[in-house]
Image (cartoon, grey):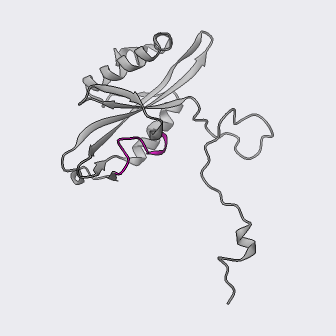
């Protein structure tokens, strides 16, 4: 019987792995990759209402932020014995005539018990909120007031000019 898994023909085939495209995906030849979204202007911000902190953690782009490492996540909140609330906020920046501004801001809940190495998060929600941020939506209504204020302070302190050029909706929700 022929071994189809180790044949020379299969060794030369390239897989269709997941690739994040950068730059302008609509320029060039117009073939493969046209219409793909660029994540160049998106930043994941972790909001920790317990410690009163907000910070950028680029590892969150691939579900590998410092707080997510070594944690087994389930979609059932009951599997997290002593949950600690965190928010993963997808922040997208766009450029207008006057300069860059916060374009999309969406928040996703995470509950983590670091000691038990268990956590709750909804992966579909994280992916959908990331997509909505890229499309300029603002969804932070489910964040409690403390977390919204922390996020607002962080975005304002990061670059007040960018914050001031942002939509009134973003300013109102974060002020």
Q: Is residue 91 left or right of residue 142?
A: right
- All told, the count of numbered labels is 0
Q: Residue at x 36, y 47 (%)?
A: 122
- Is 35 or 67 nearer to us in this picture? 67
Q: Residue at x 69, y 36 (%)?
A: 25
- Is 29 or 153 nearer to us in this picture? 153
Q: Measured from the top left, where is residue 142 in percent x and y?
A: 30, 31
Q: Residue at x 70, y 61 (%)?
A: 14
Farthest right residue? 29
Q: Measured from the top left, where is residue 65 in percent x and y?
A: 41, 41
Q: Measured from the top left, where is residue 168 in percent x and y?
A: 43, 13
Residue 95 occupies quadrant: top right
Over which residues does the magenta segment extend? Answer: 61-70
Q: Measured from the top left, where is residue 70 in percent x and y?
A: 35, 51
- Specify the quadrant that holds the N terminus: bottom right
Farthest bottom residue? 1
- Is 175 or 45 nearer to us in this picture? 45
């Amino acid at each position: 019987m022929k071994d189809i898994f180790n044949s020379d023909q299969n060794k030369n085939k390239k897989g269709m792995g997941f690739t994040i495209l950068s730059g302008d995906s609509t320029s060039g030849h117009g073939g493969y990759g046209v219409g793909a979204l660029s994540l160049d202007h998106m930043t994941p911000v972790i909001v920790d209402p317990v410690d009163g902190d907000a910070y950028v953690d680029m590892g969150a782009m691939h579900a590998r932020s410092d707080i997510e490492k070594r944690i087994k996540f389930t979609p059932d909140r009951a599997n997290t014995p002593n949950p600690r609330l965190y928010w993963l906020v997808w922040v997208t920046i766009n450029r207008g005539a006057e300069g860059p501004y916060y374009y999309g801001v969406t928040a996703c809940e995470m509950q983590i018990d670091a000691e038990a190495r268990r956590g709750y998060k909804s992966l579909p929600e994280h992916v959908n909120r990331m997509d909505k941020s890229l499309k300029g939506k603002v969804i932070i209504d489910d964040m409690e007031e403390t977390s919204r204020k922390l996020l607002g302070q962080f975005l304002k302190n990061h670059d007040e000019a960018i914050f001031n050029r942002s939509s009134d909706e973003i300013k109102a929700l974060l002020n």
